[in-house]
């Protein structure tokens, strides 16, 4: 699985961090997402898909691995 994260689109809701904490973090300065792992291992894919679905701004895109 490969991800793309658009920090410009992110509104800092933090849902991704709660859903997939090893994959996403939040910038302490502006609250926007900080991707920790853009090629998550298979065991994280379920959480990443969920994070993509719950993100209110559509900032997370799965570019491969569907
Ligand atoms: S859930 Fe979406 S809007 Fe919220 S911090 Fe993560 S990427 Fe940004």
Image: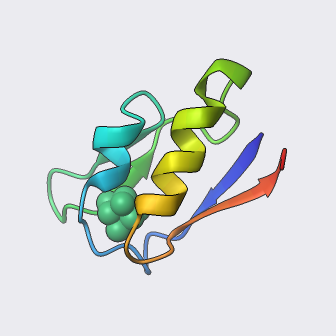
- Residue pictured at 72% horizontal, 23% vertical: 42
Quarter containing ligand 1? bottom left
The quarter of the displayed image where residue 5 is located: bottom right
Residue 14 picture location, percent across and down: 25, 55
Q: Is residue 23 depicted above or below 63 in this figure?
A: above
- Residue pictured at 44% horizontal, 69% vertical: 7
Q: Is residue 34 depicted above or below 1 in this figure?
A: below
Residue 34 picture location, percent across and down: 39, 50
Left/right placement of residue 26 relative to residue 46 reads: left
Q: Is residue 15 depicted above or below 38 in this figure?
A: below
Specify the quadrant that holds the N terminus. Answer: top right
Residue 37 picture location, percent across and down: 57, 35
- Residue pictured at 15% horizontal, 50% vertical: 28
Residue positioned most to the top: 43
Residue 43 picture location, percent across and down: 64, 19
Left/right placement of residue 49 relative to residue 65 reads: left
- Residue pictured at 43% horizontal, 27% vertical: 22
The quarter of the displayed image where residue 44 is located: top right
Left/right placement of residue 19 relative to residue 40 reads: left
């Amino acid at each position: 699985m490969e991800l793309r994260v658009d920090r410009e689109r992110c509104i800092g809701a933090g849902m991704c961090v709660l859903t997939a904490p090893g994959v996403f973090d939040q910038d302490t300065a502006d609250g926007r997402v900080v991707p920790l792992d853009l090629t998550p291992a298979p065991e994280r894919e379920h959480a990443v898909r969920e994070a993509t679905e719950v993100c209110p701004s559509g900032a997370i895109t799965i570019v491969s691995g569907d």
